Amino acid sequence: MITARPIPTGRRPRVRRILLALLALILGLTACGRIPTDGQVYHYAEGETSSATPTPAYSPAGPREGDDPEQILRGFFEAGTGVEDDYAVARSFLTRDLAASWSPEDETWVYRDGITVEGDGGQDRLRAEIPVATHVDDRGIATSYDEPDTRTLHVGFTRVDGQWRISSIPNGTALTRTQFERLFRSFSLYFYDPTYTYAVPDIRWFVSRPTVATSLVRVLLQGPAPYLNGAVVSPIPAGTSLQRASVPVDGGVAQVGLTGDEISKAGQLTLERVHSQLRQSLAGITAISDAAISIDDKKIDVGQVSDYREPQKDPQVGEQQVGVREDELVTYAPDQVGAVSNLKAPLAAPHQPGTDPSRSVYAYLDEARGHLGVRAQNGAALDLDLPGRLTRPSIDFRRWVWTASADGTVHAVLGDRDGQQPRTVTADWLQGQSVSSLRISRDGTRALVVTGEGSAARLWVAGVVRDENGAPTRLLDPLRVSTTVHPAQARWISDSAAVIADTAGDGVEVMHLTGRSDQLDGLSGIEAISGGDGVQSVYAQTAADVYRLSGSSWSRVETEVRDLAYPG
């Protein structure tokens, strides 16, 4: 039962959205793959939107008669906000030849302060220095920097009919942060886990204009972002390209024409998966409700595989958690507590248990956190003594039990078979790091990892590489996730969000991969946290009590069950 009696809070109630630099792309890794200690780089992010054809945000002016080269250059930068008619105003600052070849979306430089323009060896040469806070490449992958990264552009000019025009400049546009946030939107591409059971989001950034469907399909054909490359798969064969330069939309249906040697030979199951991937990846565009595929101008019919199941977005885990009551594993749901049956007796009193999404495998630690016990409904049992203090077990949908030692060693063992030995999952970037939390995403393709303590604590997302049998072999180089609290524990609450707790303080927040941060009421003395299906399924534990998140604040739960955890 949930009661509304007073609770210990560490700050006034509030929920706020914060535009953060989220998903930090780790650049400059050393040869051994260790985490860098300075110069961190973050992916930029903001709240996701489904709008694709907004009202024009800016109406920049074209060149004026008599403008000198610096005025032309600064006018060109300002005209980068005019996305209508394929950046026609910006192109008017260029010579005819350059206007025809200039590609505005190859790069976007989001800058702080102002752009410095200086001479560069002649009246027809200027040098522009841009203090870049965020960089977006031609694949829509956005990277933001702790400290501005100066980008130097060498710009050439020539006279056309007596007026200065730009004759040479790198492809791309330069925007202030305000301009960027008004013009760009985040979109979720979808790739799949290797079993094609689940869809995995991959956030990209593009100008929200009618051609965005073409941009999304183009980058989808190029494959996943680096931190997912090797962890996820695409049904679209390598070498596939758009048959034409655009993806038109007719009656809400995106008309996707493809070509390529392998796609032309693809079987019906592959084509069903390609259709699913296109439809799911274009779903963020309001004007699109479906996708139609043609290959070399031949229309492809879908819905031809009777038992086809589309990979699932955002899998749910349900209300039931696992916990401990009087040294026994129990299940817990609101007002319902039951024994976990059909398991062999544990060798040690269980602490910090976990279970898989099918609730057929359970794992737990002993009080000293050096012993890992695994019990399965089929009677399998494992008891493993591992070095160092272990993180709470995380069990993926393929029934692999994960834990990490404090020294950064990642262990995984198959939980529903007797006699299994744990394998070490390679993660060179974790060498020598203190790991306090490790959770595998519900799609089995990503690890959410907390390293360090206090102000040195960091939150990471790393792709999970598996062998042909599904056994985990490696964690890819990670992205760093920016947080407003010092992370100690992190729990997935969807395929694109996690709840983060500072157990040394009182801070709790929900981080979304689209960039939104919901900062919640603090909870004094928080020791542990669990997260289910969204923010309505978040629990926290103190030394004396258990609480459930209600809105942005906490309500005490009357229960004797401790160490609660949702599946995963």
Image (cartoon, grey):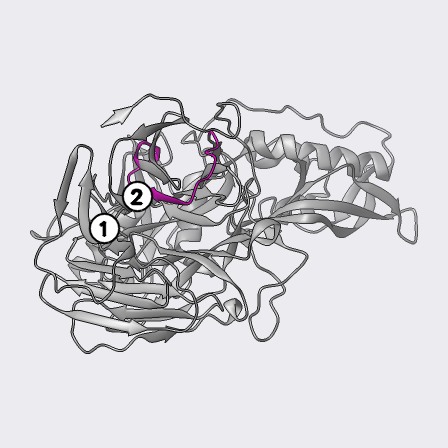
Callout 1: helix, strand or loop? loop
The residue at the point 48 percent across, 23 percent down is 13
Are there few (<14), some (14-19), or many (20+) residues within 10 Å of tag 2?
many
Circles 2 and 1: CB atoms closer than 8 Å: yes
Are there few (<14), some (14-19), or many (20+) residues within 10 Å of tag 1?
many
The extreme right residue here reads 122
Q: Is residue 429 above or below residue 242?
A: below
Residue 457 seen by the camera: yes
Quadrant location of the N terminus? top left
Callout 2: helix, strand or loop? helix
The residue at the point 45 percent across, 65 percent down is 476
Left or right of 121, for residue 458:
left
Residue assigned mark 2: 280
Which is nearer the eye, 544 or 33? Answer: 544
Which is nearer the eye, 380 or 300? Answer: 380
Q: Position of residue 171 (x, y in %)?
A: 65, 49
Mark number for residue 311?
1
- Amino acid on which the number 1 mark rests in the picture: Pro
Is residue 531 shown in magenta?
yes
Left or right of 549, for residue 22:
right
The residue at the point 71 percent across, 32 percent down is 78
Q: Which residues are magenta?
A: 521-537
Rounded to the nearest angstrom, the CA distance separating label 2 from label 1 is 10 Å
Left or right of 384, for residue 554:
right
Is residue 217 shown in magenta?
no
- Amino acid on which the number 2 mark rests in the picture: Gln
Residue 513 seen by the camera: no
Mark toward the start of the polypeptide (2 vs 1): 2
Left or right of 203, for residue 377:
left
